[in-house]
Amino acid sequence: MRALLKHFAILLILAAVPAPAQDNLPLGKLPPGRVLLVAQPHHDDHTTDYGMGGLIARFVENGFESYYVRGSNDEKDGPHGYGRNDIVNLKETWDAIRILGMKKVISLNWRNDFMNPIPLDELREQLIFVIRKYRPEVVLGHNPWEHYQKNPDHRNVARALVEACWLAGYATVHPEHFDLGLKPHSVPHYYGKGRLDWGLGQISNIAMELNESQERKKELAIAAHRNVYGSGGAARALSAQLEKEGKYIPEFEKAASELEASDMITHWWMNWTSRETGRKAGVKYAEDYYYTGSLYHLPGLREFVAKNAEPLR
Amino acid sequence: MKRRQFMHLAFAQPSRGVLVLAADAEWLLYAGGAVAGMISSGAEAHLIRIGNDERQSWDLQPEETALRNRRESEAAARILGIQSVVSLGFRSSELREVPHTTMRDRLMMHIRRLRPGVLFIPNPHAEHDRNLDRYYAGAAAEDAWHCARFANFLPAASDHGLVPYIVPEVYYYAPPVDPRRREPESTATFVPQPLQVDIGGAFARKLEAALALETINRDRAMRVKQTLAASGQRLRVLDSVDGAAARRIAEENVRGLARICAEGTPFSQAEEFRYAGIDFGIPREYR
């Protein structure tokens, strides 16, 4: 969040610096299922550069019903002040999920950037409730073990979320939900996103390939967050910096406004990030994740199951 | 610096007792063999259960789950040879909401009371374990180990004779799910290092203890069956989840864990730790 405008300024530097060595990322397949739940603290976390707009679009194109849970009220993000930011950011969350083909935003409305002191078990209960209601086979969120994650909202929602994914399957956890018609449901597949350019960042274990359509939707979805990414400031700042060096970007001359030029930067940045990840997996576009499947937490049984599992009769 | 990474239990005999601090009943899957081995070598061992294990069952109420898991944890501890079990009774899956200092001070009191030579604690630095009770309990346990040595902590208990105490050896345990768990840290001083311990001589006892966790074993078997069914698979052994099927899955799990932890070692069965011994506290050049 609030980082994209800075990104192009460091793009030139990054282009000259080798990315952390993590080539040969294995390509993952889509798991079976019909419901995808994405839970993040902020209005734009499902669309930012390091994921997960492209993968969401891929799930949707493959028939998944998809829902977005926004943990916070995003009151800090944008130029308008608390109330107005909240309203505008929620509207733009809807705009972005429609581009990706998702069905609904469920906004939990915890106070933005105040998620360190909140009772995480309360947030977790809400996530368990949503999981039991929509019964997703796949959940996307932040990787709670991502190194140098500076935004505690990301870490805290991710911690509550990974616990919710398995505790939702336990009848001993929040049994009061069952009086409302809900039933236990555990989530077998979790994709955790993180950044690879913050120190050791996240050591991903899987890359998910994107096609042109999914990559394009990802680029459009982030741009839907006009309140934070629609100022034109990125193009202005970059042009000013290059002008000092006697350089300019010819493509900007085709843009009708600074805003349009800034959108170009957003598209370039998003496209470059997907291509960089794709390069590590030997494909054109990809996003990378730390994936944990249904038996990840039972390493002792993996070999036994691999040898002895057979198709269900 | 070449670091010692493997240890036969014969070299790991503690001078005094062993104290295990555990977030949940499954601690013995990750450290039960090493503890049983030390007991075989003459150590006296004690267990502090921090969480009440009220969640982990298939079809029981939380209260019944907590009661059964307590009884079965105590039975498993007896099989390992552990002399005493103290249950602190904090609600499992909610250890995050227990004030860190509350948990730490309870643990510190037991460290001073029992004055062990070896401490086993959940590793709060391990990654990718979805059971975050182990993170919060581990953080409190690590802090308790550290603070138990200072006179300005628990002054009332000090006045009662529970004087400051330093545990000389600490084993941090965790499920072997963190892909970076065997990467050495930057320095042996003040940072625990990876260690794989041979549990071949204690494996049978560890397995017997694990089989005593009947409620948890049934829960695990049912969830594996459910998980496989969701992806169109089955295990024949789980077509009917009776006691024998639950025990079979528990046994395969314990054997599989021992095999994974022994990879890359001369051992056939092992457990993995981060270990803080003398290298941790006193740099070589000062010894």
Image (tube, helix red, strand yellow):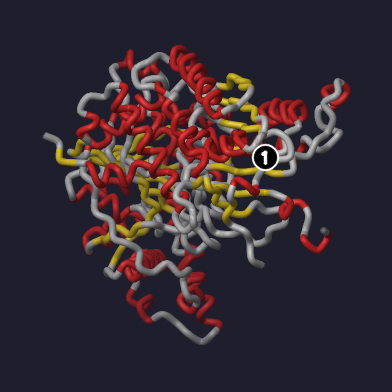
Q: Which of A120 and B200 is in front in this view?
A: B200
Query: Where's residue B117, x and y in %?
Result: 72, 38
Task: Say which residue label 1 marks.
Answer: B142
Query: Where's residue A12, x and y in %?
Result: 48, 76
In the current view of this chain or complex, which residue is farthest to the bottom? A246
- Relative to B84, does residue B178 appear above or below in the rendering? below
In the current view of this chain or complex, which residue is farthest to the left? A313
Query: Where's residue B235, x and y in %?
Result: 22, 36
**Neighbour tally class for label 1: few under 14, some 14-19, many 20 plus, Cα within 10 Å:** many
In the current view of this chain or complex, which residue is farthest to the right? B159
Name which residue lies at 51% across and 45% down.
B271
Q: How many numbered marks appear?
A: 1
- Residue A119 appears left or right of A273: right
- Residue A49 appears left or right of B139: left
Name the amino acid, label 1: Glu
Dividing the picture into quadrants, the one containing residue A262 is bottom left
- Relative to B64, does residue A17 appear above or below in the rendering? below
Q: Nearer the viewer, residue A57 or A290?
A: A290
Name which residue lies at 52% across and 34% down.
B27
- Relative to A279, does residue B115 appear above or below in the rendering? above
Name which residue lies at 86% across and 24% down.
B161
Query: Where's residue B237, x and y in %?
Result: 23, 32
- Quadrant that contains the C terminus of chain A: top left
Q: Nearer the viewer, residue A12 or A312?
A: A312
Name which residue lies at 45% across and 76% down.
A15
Q: Nearer the viewer, residue B216 or B204?
A: B204
- Would you say residue B202 is visible in this rendering? yes
